[in-house]
Image (cartoon, helix red, strand yellow):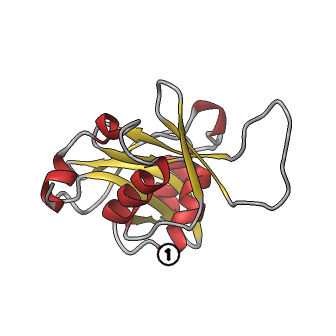
Amino acid sequence: MSGEDKMTANPREEVGKANNTELVKRLLIENYGYAPDLVYEIRGRYHKVYAWKPCIFEVKGPDRQGVYFARIESDGIRLSIEGSFLVGPKATKNVVELDDERARRYLAGESVEIGDRELHGWVIVKWRSYFLGSAKAKEGRLINYVPGDRRLRVEL
């Protein structure tokens, strides 16, 4: 499969056929130019990605390992807020920086305008030195994916 074929293929179709860690790292590098050295596990029908560092201590308990890191979408990988914190500082592409006003509106749950109408797909959203999560860039807008319970109540 050529690099171009990988980018146009549905990544969800690869879940279960490829090693989870290798698949997630490949998607991260293709989309953001960087993949943290973590263990990745894809879980459930929504293809949620959990990530963690290996540890010499065996952790036992009702919870599985890892922090919610991302979700495999049909058109790439969508980072969680925590995932954007881990990838964002070393990402080399698809990072959109917002000014104060657009960041405020984005954190309140609005989709916001960006200047780049050519940018399409999943991007990391940044404000100053903070990574706010990910959004889908489409037709000069960032489509908001901040979960309702994590949105800020702000005066606009």
- Secondary structure under the numbered disc 1 in the rendered image: helix
- Which residue: 52% across, 52% down? 133
- Which residue: 41% across, 40% down? 72
Q: Amino acid at mark 1?
A: Lys
- Which residue: 38% across, 75% down? 92
Q: Is residue 139 left or right of residue 137?
A: left
Toward the viewer: 33 or 41? 41
- Which residue: 52% across, 65% down? 87
Residue at the limit of the structure toward the top, as seen here: 45
- The residue to which callout 1 is attached is 90
Q: Position of residue 109 (x, y in %)?
A: 51, 39
Q: Is residue 121 left or right of residue 69?
A: left
Q: Position of residue 51 (x, y in %)?
A: 61, 51
Quarter of the picture containing the C terminus is top right
Few, some or many residues within 10 Å of mark 1 (<14, 14–19, 20+): few
Quarter of the picture containing the N terminus is bottom left
Quarter of image, res 152: top right
The vertical placement of 61 against 123, above or below, is above
The count of marks equals: 1
